[in-house]
Amino acid sequence: MLIRVPRASEVRSREITDEELYLRRREFLRQSAAGAGALAGGLLLPGLGGAVEGAPAAGEAPGAVFPLSPFSTDEETTRYEHATTYNNFYEFGTDKEDPSRNAHRMRTRPWAVEVAGEVRRPGTLDLEDLLAPHAVEERIYRLRCVEAWSMVIPWLGIPLKDVLERLEPTPHARYVAFRTLHDPKQMPGQRRPILRWPYREGLRLDEAMHPLTLLATGMYGRDLPNQNGAPLRLVVPWKYGFKSIKSIVRIELTRRRPDTSWNISAPREYGFYSNVNPEVSHPRWSQRRERRIGDFFKRPTLMFNGYAEEVGSLYAGMDLARNY
């Protein structure tokens, strides 16, 4: 079954960020970086002059043009309305449709990210200050992802390693821990003890430094919708979706492996690594086959979600059934 990707004009206006606000934000970021000569590669928005590299993926906004990452797949892109209305974001409810119904109440500006732990440059940074040095390096990453279902999403973002290197990890840093906003007034799901709030996730440092690990600020050529983790989320495409923590407010580099929310809640079912592995079954179901949203039939699950060539070396010699 083929999935038809809608034109931008077919996206319901209530689901997207206002186009003028989106373009002004990108223009601000790019002009800030231009003062340092960062536009030498010619990655410009239409109307600012100069060359343009790459093109928006199907379904993306026509106003913003970013280069396409070499990691991108040529598989059919998931429809925007599927990717933004069928989500797991328990801070807004446990039903798949709850985030798109309830997330509008969350304020994403201003937004600050605390940086702590084993870094030489700790502190609390405004989101734009955190990302501005890398604004012109943002790329479209059209990646296979396991969110609520299997999807192919054109993310807009930068490698996490670019930010971590700027923060200067100390030699003692071995892991990266992340934390989501905790605000029950804005996030009604946090009023119930579904998980131990705030939501926590973590990666090994070498996983975090892999060029496929993204800090995403947008999707389909627009800012992230709230239900998809605005204004800043992690994307780790070879792991199950709950590893890709949303609405990040804290990044901490640590010596010891951090606790993670689902591993705290159900350690037998959710391990720290949570790599997509068809050979390791969840205690309550097989993971050998998956269903891509919009499709009727299931397809074989690929090792590391199809990114084995890129990330398999990270786990060389490990027992992946034990380190699940």
Image (cartoon, helix red, strand yellow):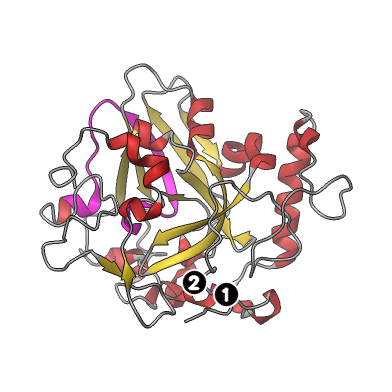
2 or 1: tag closer to the N-terminus: 1
Q: Magenta stretch: residue 255 in it? A: yes
- Distance Cα–Cα, label 2 vs label 1: 8 Å
Foreground mark, 2 or 1, reads: 2
Q: Give residue 188's position: percent from left, percent from top.
A: 35, 69
Whether residue 106 is visible to the viewer of this picture, yes or no, is no
Q: Amino acid at mark 2?
A: Thr
Q: Which residue is mark 1?
A: 15
Q: Which mark is residue 246?
A: none
Above or below for 231 versus 128: below
Which residue is located at x 52 percent, y 78 percent? 3
Q: Amino acid at mark 1?
A: Glu
Label 2 residue SS: helix
Q: Which residue is mark 2?
A: 84
Q: Give residue 2's position: percent from left, percent from top.
A: 51, 79
Tell which of 49 and 23 is nearer to you.
49
In the image, the segment drawn in magenta is 239-263
Above or below for 36 versus 275: above
Tell which of 71 and 48 is nearer to you.
71
| Residue 155, picture quadrant | bottom right
Residue at the top extreme of this rendering: 171
Q: For the residues labelled 2 and 1, say whether their Cβ atoms are less than 8 Å apart.
A: yes
